[in-house]
Amino acid sequence: NRDFLIAPSILSADFARLGEEVDNVLASGADVVHFDVMDNHYVPNLTIGPMVCEALRKHGVTAPIDAHLMVKPVDRLIGDFIDAGASYITFHPEASEHIDRSLQLIRDGGCKAGLVFNPATPLSYLDYVMDKVDMILLMSVNPGFGGQAFIPGTLDKLREARRRIDASGLDIRLEIDGGVKVDNVAEIARAGADTFVAGSAVFKAGSSTDPNRYDSVMRAF
Ligand code: DX5
Ligand code: ZN
């Protein structure tokens, strides 16, 4: 399953007009809504939670919502995001006391489960849970903020993650998050990613209130 998915991160959207922003980016061809949850504890920033996810569902968003939990502890919020209509729920292994349990909680709730790897976090966290993940998310920046530069060493890590997935024979998506732009996405795809988060590259494109303003950047991706 190597179809490519583009997942704009709403972290860089206009939060005062979030429903409209999500509608527009999906109408322009986005596949997945990447939803960054930050708690001012695990990461030094504070964003949005399950109420906003639920509000997007009530607004009529039917596309997959990819909840990237940068929170500690994680387990209680997993339940909240299941109830709020998330499709994917990913978390950082360092933020969970019981990684296997957290993955199981997500799948028991009917969602797809993923582990997120910071730039310096080893992929060996996968060793005993490979059969319990639907998604591996590699951070190509340190988590907490949009608009940072892609860390080049992530390309080798992507190749290693791709080898692990192919060797497992399992259906696992390989997502990349941080500093993804139109001009580096091809190289990132060649390194093995199949799901691309892009925040500032998408939402800072286009102008003002043109409902079609994301058409050209989404075409470029
Ligand atoms: C960072 C977030 C990213 C961020 C990416 O902690 O996980 O999803 O929004 O933003 P860009 O694409 O601007 O690097
Ligand atoms: Zn993210």
Image (tube, rainbow, N blue to C red):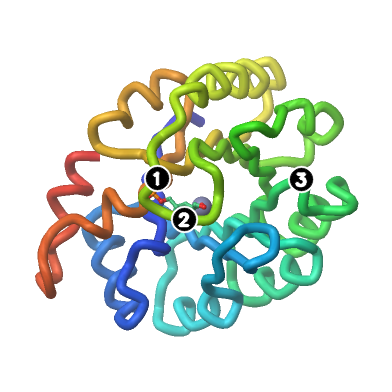
Q: Up-down: is 212 above or below 169? A: below
Q: Quadrant of residue 56?
A: bottom left
Secondary structure beneath disc 1?
loop
Secondary structure beneath disc 2?
loop
- Real-space Cα distance between discs 1 and 2? 7 Å
Q: Up-down: is 113 above or below 123? A: below
Q: Up-down: is 64 above or below 135? A: below
- The residue identified by callout 1 is 148
Q: Quadrant of residue 9?
A: bottom left
Other residues around mark 3 within 10 Å, as few (<14) / some (14–19) / many (≥20): many
Question: Picture coordinates of residue 74 (x, y %)?
Answer: 76, 62
Q: Amino acid at mark 3?
A: Pro
- Real-space Cα distance between discs 3 and 2? 19 Å
Numbered mark located on residue 207 in the image: none
Other residues around mark 2 within 10 Å, as few (<14) / some (14–19) / many (≥20): some
The residue sitting at 40% across, 78% down in the picture is 60
- Real-space Cα distance between discs 3 and 1? 22 Å
- The residue identified by callout 3 is 93
Which of the two discs, 3 and 2, sits closer to the camera? 2
Question: Does the residue tagged 1 have its C-beta within 8 Å of any atom of ligand 1?
Answer: yes
Going by the picture, which residue comes out furthest to the front?
Answer: 44
Question: Does the residue tagged 2 have its C-beta within 8 Å of any atom of ligand 1?
Answer: yes
Which quadrant does the C terminus fall into?
top left
Numbered mark located on residue 145 in the image: 2
